[in-house]
Amino acid sequence: MYGNLCVVGAVGIWLLIATKFEMPVSTTHSCVGGLVGMAIASKGPACVTWYKDPDPDSAKYLPGGITGIVLSWIFSPLLSGLFAVALFAVVRCVVLRSQNSFMRAIKFYPVLIWLAIWINTFFIISKGVSKKVCPSKTNIWICSGYDSDLKEGAEKDAAGGKLSKDDYPGKVNGWVALGFSCGVGLFFAVALIPLYLAIKKRVEAEFADKDTEAGEAEEAKEEAKPPPEPPTTFCGKALAAISYSINRDVHDVKKEETDGVITAIHDNAEKFDPKTEAVFKYIQIFTAICDSFAHGATDVANAMGPFMSIWTIYTNIDTFEFGKGAQKTDLENNDQYWILALGGVGIGLGLLLYGYQIIQAIGVKLAVITPSRGFAIELGAAIVIIIGSYLGIPLSTTHCQVGATTGVALLEGGRGVNKWVLGKTAFGWIITLIIAGILAGILTGQGIRAPLGGAINIAGCSPKVWTDDHPSEWCDTTDPTCDYEGTLPDPNCYIDSPQYIFLDRECPTFIANGPPAPPPPPPLS
């Protein structure tokens, strides 16, 4: 519990520092780095899985462990960049560069809606529904699994035995998931036809109003209003600090720069019909939903993992096997979805109050992002994240977003990317594991080495002390030098400290050359 608390604290500190310096680093990798640092500080480097062989039978085609994390630095941006480039290249050729691009975008709208809904539905069915549906023998026709396991389950069912979810360990059949999700996407693409027509009318009316306003502005310009007076009260200052992130225009950074790099990148980008770009603003709503779903499927779950471990231990303290980690039954009995909801609320508040830093870095400084480009970036990154999660490829949401943005920007040539921002981002990726691990290791180490008097369980071991209610559980927690007769203490339950030793078992008797034997416990009444 204490170790995971240190991980949460270290990850929070590092993410705030990285955000301050506009480095879009991975929350997932920060959590992994923190866990590695905590494990090394408490048990040593042998506790860390540095490399794990691929397991194609479990749909994991790349190495696991820390090696897989390092590989994701390459695969995440590369794959998402390729998908985003392919999407934007098609849209640019078919829609944006056509003579009547506005009407072409309206006609193209249903296809994009179908694609976004299809991808999300396929992921939900294949990853989430399979755990609820496939254990049932009545639904085995939509499931796929290992032939031997399915055969054993069928034989057990025929013999009248009671089936469990382990008898059908497969997942939803890929063709069933593909066909069903495709049908769902097609249904919504057709059902939303009135929405497309409404968007067409709204965009046309919007630009007609803009033309009128522009003509009136040329005839009479309003005098510039003076800036509001800065607040003087504490509440006013606090409200101004909170609203700064909400009201800030991230494009103001172009006015604040001194070298002109960002302005040159934006001026050199290819411009498209503003009405067509306005249509893609509405398309971006669906791709943002798709991207947010992929984000929640990875970062929210990974970020709340350490807290979930703390909660699992706390709620199963009577049955939890210290030194062995969380057991399968502990996790199954603790479906605390409120923890994931808490993570979602935290991410939303972070975006609201401090998200402008990363939005400004990726959305303005790194490259030009217009609605048409943003659509390709979001959908391309989401596709790669969802496919990677399905195939067990270790991908990072942050890396995929940066890779997709860079890929689309490179269609403008090398001048379309801010190389300084890209280099700073890559540097942040590399040092994330290191810094998060060091911070978590320092916090964990100072807690383990502190003189706690045996009162707090640090190493995950249960110290047993003599009490009137439990006289048979007398244990010496003060002298690590004494030898014991019989079975030695579990090495996993030893704190390397000159003062304390914790035992997760009944104490053996002292041998002759040890310290004086303790008095016999009082008889049980």
Image: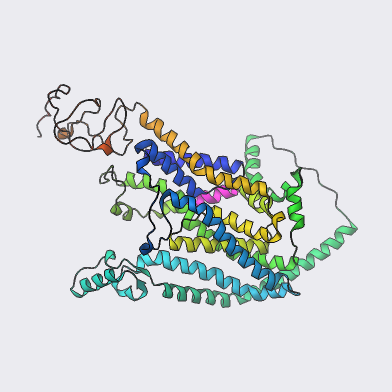
Is the residue 320 above or below the residue 484 in the image?
below
Q: Nearer the viewer, residue 422 or 461?
A: 422
Q: Residue at x 50, y 48 (%)?
A: 27
Is-magenta flag for residue 319? no
Q: At which x and y percent is residue 97?
A: 73, 70
445 on left or right of 190: left
Q: Nearer the viewer, residue 175 or 456?
A: 175
| Quadrant showing the C terminus | top left
| Quadrant showing the N terminus | top left
Residue 353 in sight = no
Q: Residue at x 47, y 51 (%)?
A: 69
Predominant SS of the magenta segment: helix
Is the residue 315 above or below the residue 109 in the image?
above
Number of numbered discs overlaid on the protein picture: 0
Is the residue 179 above or below the residue 511 in the image?
below
Color scheme of the displayed model: rainbow
Q: Residue furthest right?
A: 219
**Magenta region: which residues?**
342-352
Q: At which x and y percent is residue 49?
A: 38, 47
Q: At which x and y percent is residue 82?
A: 58, 62
45 on left or right of 30: left
288 on left or right of 279: left
- Quarter assignment of residue 93: bottom right
Q: At which x and y percent is residue 389?
A: 46, 60
Q: Residue at x 48, y 48 (%)?
A: 29
